[in-house]
Image: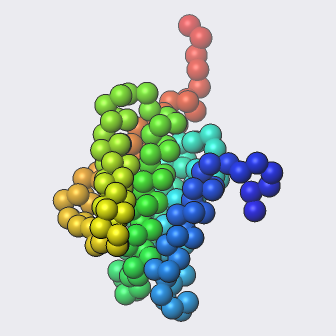
Amino acid sequence: MMRGRPRPWPLASWLLAVTHLGLLGDARRGALVANHLSLLRGNLPSLSPSAAPWTAGVALVTDWLDGRLARARKEETAFGAYADPLADLVFWSWYVFRNECNPWIRAATVLAWPLPAAVITAAYFALGQSLDYPRPAMTRLLSAAFQCWIGTRAFGRWISSAAPRTSG
């Protein structure tokens, strides 16, 4: 599957997907388009190891589409509820740490995704069971706004790198 020496991003993505496959439920409702879009977003680091700016755009579009499709088609699943924030964690942490040198943006990224994931994981182990963690609407809104801001910065870098250089 990964030919030769395993790379960390595909391996981490595969492990996240495999450990959460039980959330798919029955096969008819599990592997839906919205879930595939979340998995695509989580796997973008393995598709573009260079963290190209286009990946931020793809991540924003897939994040927007997966939720819209799941709600519109009444196909929300437990897997999707877990896969969506995990995909955000994987993609945006990877993207920011590959492209942003600003320490404030990096710190905000840790506060937005890896830190909450670590706290939830620690709670899982401490309690010895899975728990339904809160997903307040304001938190989701702030996360989406942060993603859009990072995506806008990526688009700006992409445009400035594509602009013709004049020697003067």
**Residue drawn where x is 50% and y is 30% of the image:** 160
**Residue drawn where x is 54% and y is 81% of the image:** 31
Q: Nearer the viewer, residue 58 or 22?
A: 22
Give residue 127's quadrant in the image: bottom left
Q: At which x and y percent is residue 79?
A: 44, 76
**Residue drawn where x is 34% and y is 57% of the image:** 122
Q: Nearer the viewer, residue 126 or 138?
A: 126
Report if residue 44 is visible in the image.
yes
Q: Nearer the viewer, residue 164 or 37?
A: 37
Q: At which x and y percent is residue 17?
A: 54, 68
Q: Nearer the viewer, residue 119 or 148?
A: 119
Q: Is 144 left, or right, of 87 in this rendering?
A: left
Quadrant (top left, top right, bottom left, bottom right) of the C terminus: top right
Q: Is 99 left, or right, of 102 in this rendering?
A: right
**Residue drawn where x is 34% and y is 65% of the image:** 124
Report if residue 67 is visible in the image.
no
